Amino acid sequence: MDERGVIGLARSDDLIRWTLDGPITAPGDFAELEVPQYLLTDGRHYLLFCTGKPSRRRLADPSATPWIGTHYLTSDRAEGPWTLAPDPPMAADTEGQWYAGRVVKDDGRLLFLAWRRSRDNRFVGGLSAPVEIDVDEHGQLSVGLDDL
């Protein structure tokens, strides 16, 4: 079964001794949830991740959006529970051209950058140009992929 990917939580007061709290996300859609990034903006909690392996269920559904790239989960609290954001993903396609994306804040704006891969799945070795993230009235995140 390939849908067992989760994100765990570890805590430390001194960065030497750690306490493991276990998974804060539930398995179900992905084999891997890589490069997680926690983001708090406008009172909303987001947990970004990237994946190169969508679940068999998603691959079998012709109406499902491609999921190789960066997407996110939402929660009312930093500790979860976390819920997968609705389609479309934040920055994903069938080739994974925008991988391991990160959000940075600049003068109150949220900007997105990602590692680039070519359409034939070769690592380009560089970052995309920063592009502003749009947050709609429901808190859904999106970026203009044509601007990356």
Image: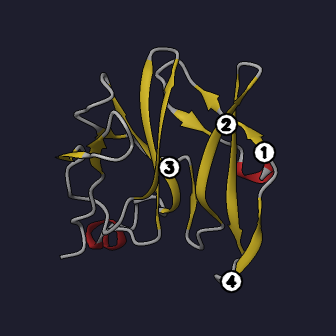
Q: Which residue is mark 1?
A: 130
Give the residue at mark 3: 89
Q: Secondary structure at mark 3?
A: loop
Judging by the rendered image, the residue that carries numbered circle 4 is 122
Q: Could you say which is closer to the camera, residue 47 or residue 1? A: 47
Dots 4 and 3: beta carbons under 8 Å?
A: no
For the residues marked 4 and 2, what is the alpha-carbon distance in whole angstroms? Answer: 25 Å
List the single residue furthest toward the top: 43
What is the C-alpha distance between the residues marked 4 and 3? Answer: 22 Å
Q: Secondary structure at mark 4?
A: loop
How far across and how far down the image is residue 72, in percent?
44, 44
- The answer to whether the residue labelled 2 contacts the one labelled 1, judged by CB atoms less than 8 Å apart, is yes
Q: Residue at x 71, y 19 (%)?
A: 108
Which mark sits nearer the N-terminus, 4 or 2? Answer: 2
Residue 14 location (% of width, % of height): 37, 37
Q: Is residue 124 above or below residue 138?
A: below
Count residues near mark 4 (Cα–Cα under 10 Å), then give few for <14, some for 14-19, many for 20+: few
Q: What's the amino acid at mark 3?
A: Pro
Q: Nearer the viewer, mark 4 or mark 2?
A: 2
The x, y position of residue 17, in whole percent, is: 28, 46
**Residue 83 occupies quadrant:** top left
* Pointers 2 and 3 in contact (C-beta within 8 Å): no
Residue at 28%, 37% (x, y): give it: 82
Which badge, 4 or 1, comes first in the chain's sequence? 4
Mark-to-mark CA distance, 2 and 3: 18 Å
Pointers 4 and 1 in contact (C-beta within 8 Å): no
Q: Which residue is mark 2?
A: 104
Q: CA distance from mark 4 to mark 1?
A: 21 Å
Question: Alpha-carbon neighbours of circle 3 within 10 Å: few (<14), some, or many (≥20)?
Answer: many
